[in-house]
Image (cartoon, helix red, strand yellow):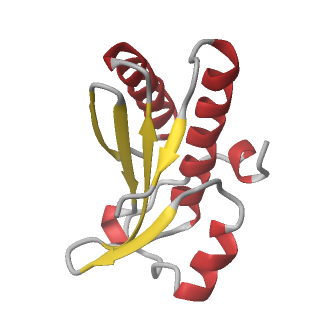
Amino acid sequence: MSDLASKKCVPCEGNIPPFNIDEIHKYLKQVDGWEVLEDKIDGFHLIKNFKFDNFLQSQEFVNKVGEVAEIEGHHPDLWFGWGYARIKIFTHAIKGLAESDFILAAKIDNIINVYSVLSLKKVTLYRSH
């Protein structure tokens, strides 16, 4: 388990600056397979794509992510369908990344690791390009 996964997300009301690129790279080393992308609307954000064997596995995974998001009070953007899920994480209030974004990413990594062992035959990651 990542040290980040044992932490709690902290609500952000916009009173902190977003991480700079050096801070982002430091935290990115602590999560598995997440990409950092930047756009004019959301600033820097984390994104990760997942593949599953069918729709039900995708839905179950997204539901688990939703449960963790509710507990943490930090809600990612989610897309899913037959055999895939895509997750985007960033802090809306600062239009960028903060520690809580990486904490949530680490908790999602834990979900996929448990799922892989318990119930899913195969979960593969793919790049968003």
Residue at 61%, 52% in the rendered image: 103
Numbered marks: total = 0
- Image height of 119 relative to 20, above or below: above
Q: Nearer the viewer, residue 12 or 112?
A: 112
Q: Quadrant of the C terminus?
A: bottom left
Residue at 62%, 81% in the rendered image: 23
- Image height of 49 relative to 116, above or below: below
- Image height of 32 relative to 99, above or below: above
Query: Does 61 sit left or right of 24 as displayed?
Result: left
- Image height of 26 relative to 87, above or below: below
Q: Nearer the viewer, residue 20 or 29?
A: 29
How far across and down, in percent of the image, does residue 22 sit? Answer: 62, 87
Residue at 70%, 45% in the rendered image: 5
Residue at 35%, 44% in the rendered image: 86
Query: Does 3 sit left or right of 60 as displayed?
Result: right
Q: Most extreme residue toward the left, as rendered? A: 41
How far across and down, in percent of the image, does residue 108 sit? Answer: 56, 40
Which of the 4 quarters of the picture holds residue 25? bottom right
Query: Does 5 sit left or right of 105 as displayed?
Result: right
How far across and down, in percent of the image, does residue 92 sit? Answer: 31, 63
